[in-house]
Amino acid sequence: MRLVTYRSVVDAAARLGVLEADLVIDVERLGAKAGHALPATMLGFIDLGPAALDALRDALDAHRGRWPVGAALPASNVKLLAPIPRPRKNIFGIGLNYVEHVAESARTLDTSKELPKQPVIFSKPPTSVIGPGDAIEHNAKITQQLDWEVELAVIIGRTAKRVSEEDALSHVFGYSVMIDVSARDNRRAGQWIYSKGQDTFAPFGPCIVTADEIGDPHTLDLWLTVNGQTKQSSNTKHMLFKIPTLISDISAAMTLEPGDIIASGTPDGVGAGRTPQEWMWPGDVVEAGVARIGTIRHPVVAV
């Protein structure tokens, strides 16, 4: 399933929907018609676990093609928000997780040229999240080096505490697309959160595709363009630390909870690694995508 958070009009509350072709099916309204008490929010739905997915599948199958009045809206008539507009916790970011990105970072960002022996973990606060089409803010008083990174986002579905790599993927609810925006000139004594955690620095969406539809998450093409020109193009098979390793490693020390997000790292092609270096500026448009999930597109604006 392709789950979205949407708003039907500007001042409406955010609601949970399912993308079905060119329609958004409201989950709570469909559930009510089918006799299932389903929530109106993504986090509420994730919290209910596999039973909610089963109930929603049953409701979709029972009503597909003859949707209840008020439950189906043309996708073109709604505003898609970030699938989880306000995460409960900081996003877990993974640095230096593609071999070629390790090499380009060592050349230009003063990081080690040696491959990390353990995942490199940082975080992005909930206030950094924006949804499809929202603007990435360029604050010239703070940065002159605004950079891009396309990433596969992993959304946790069950509590994970000291889980094994073999069991790790069973804790995944689904996958999405994220752009890890970075102000490269804002790194502080090796700490990345000020560089990567600023407002609007986590574009996220357009949907969460449930894990059962993805299967192996290490076979997905991912790409990013700026003003229509390809800057990054790779495949998740090139991750240095695969998703089971990331989940096992993080959960060894910090409990992962339903709705938590892991941004699993970016391939090479970032602006800092180019010769000459390239940065995003007001007026630019950045678009990023992951195969079988979708794309997100964002303007860069001055603030």
Image: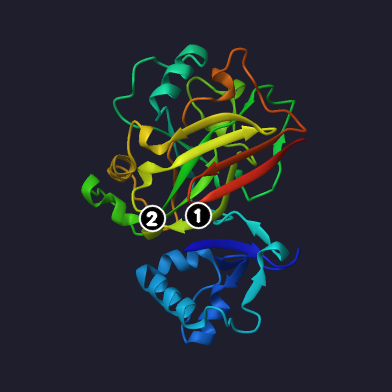
Residue 88 - label = 1
Classify residue 119 by image quadrant: top left
Q: Is residue 180 visible?
A: no
**Does residue 60 lie above or below 128 as drawn?**
below
Classify residue 78 by image quadrant: bottom right
**Does residue 10 lie above or below 298 as drawn?**
below
Residue at point 53% right, 25% down? 269
Q: Secondary structure at mark 1?
A: loop
At label 1, which amino acid type do we have? Arg
State how far apart marks 1 and 2 are (Cα). Answer: 9 Å
**Does residue 131 lie above or below 271 as drawn?**
below
Residue at point 68% right, 28% down? 280
At label 2, which amino acid type do we have? Glu
Question: Crowding near pointer 2: few (<14 within 10 Å), some, many (20+)?
Answer: some
Residue 295 - label = none
Q: Position of residue 101 (x, y in %)?
A: 45, 24
Q: Position of residue 13 (x, y in %)?
A: 67, 68
Do the residues bearing badges 1 and 2 touch, measured as CB atoms within 8 Å?
yes
Total tally of numbered discs in the picture: 2
Residue at point 55% right, 43% down? 289
Residue at point 49% right, 39% down? 222
Sequence-wise, which precedes: disc 1 or disc 2? 1
Q: Nearer the viewer, residue 180 or 213?
A: 213
Q: Which residue is mark 2?
A: 257
Q: Is residue 31 left or right of residue 145?
A: left
Q: Is residue 271 visible?
A: yes
Q: Secondary structure at mark 2?
A: loop
Q: Is residue 221 left or right of residue 287?
A: left
**Location of the C terminus (image quadrant):** top right
Q: Position of residue 60 (x, y in %)?
A: 48, 76
